[in-house]
Structure formats: structure tokens, C-alpha cells
Amino acid sequence: MDADFFMNEQTPTGQTAKRAPALPDAQTVKSVHHWTDRLFSFRVTRPRSLRFRSGEFVMIGLMGDNGKPLLRAYSIASPSWDEELEFYSIKVQDGPLTSKLQHIQPGDEIILRPKPVGTLVHDALLPGKRIYFFATGTGIAPFASLVRDPETYEKFEQVILTHTCRTRADLEYGRQLVESLKDDPLIGEFVGDKLHYYPTTTREESPKMGRITALLRDGTLFSDLGVPPLDPACDRAMVCGSMGLNTDMKEILEGAGLREGANSDPAEYVVEKAFVG
Ligand code: A2P
């Protein structure tokens, strides 16, 4: 691991250069938005060669104090057609990476390994009529990419994005993103009236309260949206959140007859842990 870093550290033979080593796989920060004292998003330049499928993640980070790259997996929140890359992150005050990453400014460099992977991709699902994106917290990041991808609307008649957070402020990144899609010159016409946004809070009063798991189990979600209960014949789902959410959602989805899919073996739902750092 990190062979490229050590190569950069070496002074080329015959030279006595003392300049600072270049950051391996460096990308430049273009903008940063702080949503709350615990959440921020940022955009960076995109490596020319980087191709990815909406919903995938890459390793990003900073150079650690020990001179080694400190990297974490982050879902790419921007769609695959975007010329920049967007990420959405929690700030953990004693987190090895995010305690530092939260201070990045436009013009700074971060490390980005251009090797996208992940299971929250269309290729891992069989064709269907309706797709659910179930997110908690920063787990909305891969869906921020997928709801901006025309393929999502070409493949499905209805797209339902649920996002459960503790407070209303925690929902704001997703709310503004969804709001912006209607008038987006690139994606607006694909979205049309297919996208249904279902935000809920658990620790602050809001129009819809409760964990999505509870709202699914008692049928509230379906009656609110005017859709039938989950049906493996036509419903597909992607899940991204805490371990607890993922475990509980698996039970609910499997209970409704949906099977977990993978890139190599597409089925009715896929799940991935939201990354924290
Ligand atoms: P709750 O407030 O009831 O714990 P966190 O900020 O801890 O990552 O949580 C984000 C959101 O995910 C919170 O609204 C939290 O609800 C919710 N959540 C946590 N665990 C689960 C779970 N097992 N099922 C459904 N929602 C969950």
C-alpha cells in the first residue's frame, strides 16, 4: 500500500531538490459548505481519467501527521456526468480524518484514489417499476448522486427518496438538493414528477416524525405516498445508513420477499454502510 507515496517522497537520483513532496493523487478543493456543526459538503476537481457509476465510493483523505495518507471511503455525491466531485461528510471532533478535513478551504488539496467501487449501483438491481432509496444521516450521499442520474428515471417510473435524521437542520442538504432538481437544466426534465422525497426526523418536531423502519412496518409510508406495500415483482430498494438501519431494513425487505443483489448477481435490493470518519 501507498507505494506511490513513498516514490514521491524519494528525492530523484542526482537531484538535491528540497521542495515539499507532491501529494499523491491530489485534487483541489473548489468549494465547501457547512450545513451544521456536524455536517459539511465539499466539491473537488475530478481526475480526467476517473469514470464511475452513480452510487459508488472512492477513498479520499489527507496526509497524516506521520507522513502517511489517512484515507476513508466516501460515497461520491455528485452524478457521473458532473465535471467536479462532491462529497458529504460528518464532522467528528476527535475523528482522525474528519477533525482535519472539516477545515479544508477552496484551493487546498485532498488525496483521492481514483478507484471507484460499491454495491449501490443500478447494475446490482433487476429491472423494476419503483425504486426506493432509504437513507439515514450522511447515508444520503450515494443517493444524491443517483437522484441526479438520468439512468434512474429511465429505469424507473417512480423514485422514492427517504431520509431520516435527528433534526430538521440535518435534512437540509438533501432538501435543498431535491428542491434544486426541478429547475435543473440538465436533469429537470428526466426527474419530472417521478421523484418523491420523504424526509423524517426522530429527535426534533417536523411534519413527519419517526424512524423509517417504524413508518414502513406500520404502513404509514405507503399510505402517505399512495403506493402499495413492498412487492418483489415491481419494487427495488437501496439502503445506506448506520449498521442498525441496514440490519433492520434487510429484515423488512427480506420479509417482503426482496432478495439482496450484487454487481455479479442482480436482485431486488442492495445495502451499504454509510461511512464515518
Ligand atoms: P434515532 O434518533 O431514533 O436514533 P445518527 O445521527 O445516530 O447516525 O442517526 C441518524 C438517524 O438514523 C436518526 O434519525 C436515527 O434515529 C436513525 N436511526 C438510527 N438507527 C436506526 C435504525 N436501526 N433504524 C432506523 N433508523 C435508525
Image: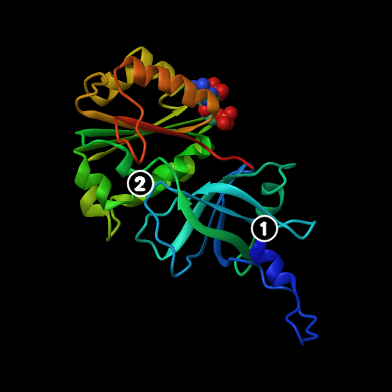
Indicate which disc, 2 or 1, sits on the residue closer to the N terminus: 1
Please identify the quadrant where the C terminus is shown: top right
Q: Nearer the viewer, residue 29 or 208?
A: 29
Quarter holding the N terminus is bottom right
Q: Is residue 268 above or below residue 86?
A: above
Secondary structure at numbered mark 2? helix
Identity, as a three-letter code, of the amino acid under mark 1: Leu
Residue type, mark 2 in image: Leu
Q: Which of these two is toward me, 171 or 251?
A: 251
Residue 101 visible in the displayed image: yes
Residue 108 circle label: none
Residue under the point 77% across and 86% down? 15
Question: Can you give x and y, in whole percent of width and height, for residue 231 in the image?
Answer: 23, 21
Q: Residue at x 30, y 43 (%)?
A: 123
Return the residue nearer the eye: 9 or 144: 9
Q: Is mark 2 within 8 Å of ligand 1?
A: no
Residue behind mark 1:
62
Q: Is residue 117 left or right of residue 183?
A: right
Q: Is residue 187 above or below residue 208?
A: below
Residue indicated by mark 2? 146
Q: Residue at x 40, y 46 (%)?
A: 55
Q: How was this image coloured?
A: rainbow
In which image quadrant can residue 80 be found? bottom left
